[in-house]
Image (tube, coloured by chain):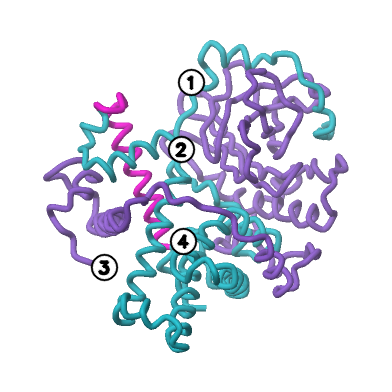
Chain colours: A cyan, B purple
Amino acid sequence: MNAVGATDLMVRRRRSPGRVHQMIGVGYGDLVTPPEDEAPLTLLEQRFAAGYEDSLQQAYQHFGPLVYRLCCRTVGEGEAADVSQEVWVAAWRGRSGYHRDRGSLAGWLVGIARFKCIDHLRARERAGRARAAAEQAGAEGDLDDSTALTAERLLLAEALRQLDSRPRSVLELAFYSDATHQEIAERTGLPLGTVKSDIRRGLDRLRRYLEGFDAADRP
Amino acid sequence: MPPIDPDDRILQSLRGGPGERSASTDDELFAARAGRAARAGGAFLDEELSAPPPQVWARVAAELGLDGTEAAPAAGPILGDAPEQQESSTDAQATVVPLASRSGWSWRSGRGMALAVASVLALAAVGAALMTNRTGGSQVVAEVALQPLEGSGSGQARLVRSADGRSYLRLDQLLDPLPEGSYAEVWLIDPTSNLQRMVSLGAVDRSGRLAIPRGIDPAVYRVVDVSIEPADGVPTHSGRSVLRGTMPL
């Protein structure tokens, strides 16, 4: 076969046969939701677990903002960059601890970040620089809980962001409006079966993120 | 894990309504946990994310000694979770065509090699799975790892034949952030046509199942191409391809 180089494609082409199909409703109309058995980040997760160095940078590009946000929220913006750096270094050095079958990479990274943030807050507490904040947070258990809860919130938001727009809207309605599936179907005009499967798949996705989070060991 | 509150309204909504239950207690626990996290703050879904300052990556790379080196993988298989699948399917390996490195793309050869190896291993690993992968009357007949032509994206495409004989492309991709006002579009290209014959399958963000139009033979249109398209209403390929792979057909 001929090698196909992208340089050959620099010229815009005449309308292709597929476009005609598409215009009569075969193309976009048949676009359906992602198959439930496939996670879109599968390849990245596999390559990260296998130790391909470029996968770290790719993971950083996709989840760097998520990790950084958790750091900002827990240790404050002033030190978030330093803690983020520790998280990524620890994640790469501890990559053998990541297993795809135990959950998502995003969840696992946020799990690592949670530990780093807690360590950082404890160290700061010991240094006496955050006594007021520590008192506000209460006992150590509360520090763990509040950090974990912040991490889970960010992670769930991230998991929802990964969904296509229709299942995302359906899940947002379920979370926010306390609507039943029937009510969501009426409000969105979607078939009840679609609403149910969107919620089912969405919850499965959230679950994989939370499982990844739970699977992270303290670095 | 806190106990499940039977009157938890978010949980009721996720189940379907008052009185309904999820499939398993385990599901309920995770749904309850999601509900708890959802209520923990007002801005649950609208959390603004911003990139960390640029020095963070530079320091990470420096500390790990990654700067500038595109080393071979530290340890063999791409599918670390499924080592038992690696030895299979030498014919799948033979059909991988590292288009990007052949066509002289400007990425460093080390990375090109690593990715080519990655795709071979990925194909080898799925080879065995292809033999048995029949779900709901659909059959995966081919699979290819998509290689980046620009940037650091990656992806997988699977050709699926459903019980009624229709063909679909299942696509999972991870692209670098797209420029404002643009989207990713998936094409099938006939590699013998000097790029004159191509079919658009539609736009996909990350994952999707795209119908292959009747009359389009995927064994002929076997190059899967993902392009960045400006949202300008022009229905033709922009010429800016970011991922590509050839179906082993």
Amino acid on which disc 4 is placed: Gly
Q: Chain of mark 2?
A: A
Residue A29 location, x and y as percent?
48, 20
The span shown in magenta is A186-211
Q: CA distance from mark 2 to mark 3?
A: 29 Å
Write down the quadrant of residue A141 in the picture.
bottom left
Image height check: is A18 above or below B67?
above
Marks 1 and 2 share the same chain:
yes
Instruction: Compare marks 4 and 1 and give the one earlier in the sequence.
Output: 1
Marks 3 and 1 share the same chain:
no
Q: CA distance from mark 1 to mark 2?
A: 15 Å
Image height check: is A95 above or below A28?
below
Residue B160 location, x and y as percent?
54, 34
Q: Chain of mark 4?
A: A
Marks 2 and 3 share the same chain:
no
Amino acid on which disc 2 is placed: Asp
> Which class describes the residues within 10 Å of circle 1: few (<14), some (14-19), or many (20+)?
few
The nearer-to-camera label among 3 and 1 is 3
The nearer-to-camera label among 1 and 2 is 2
Circle on res. A29? 1
Task: Name which residue lies at 63% across and 18% down.
Answer: B233
Amino acid on which disc 1 is placed: Gly
Write down the quadrant of residue B228 in the picture.
top right
Q: Chain of mark 1?
A: A
Instruction: Compare marks 1 and 2 and give the one earlier in the sequence.
Output: 1
**Pointer 2 residue:** A164
* Dots 4, 1 in contact, CB < 8 A: no
The nearer-to-camera label among 4 and 1 is 4
- From this viewpoint, which residue is outermost toward the right? B104
Residue B97 location, x and y as percent?
78, 42
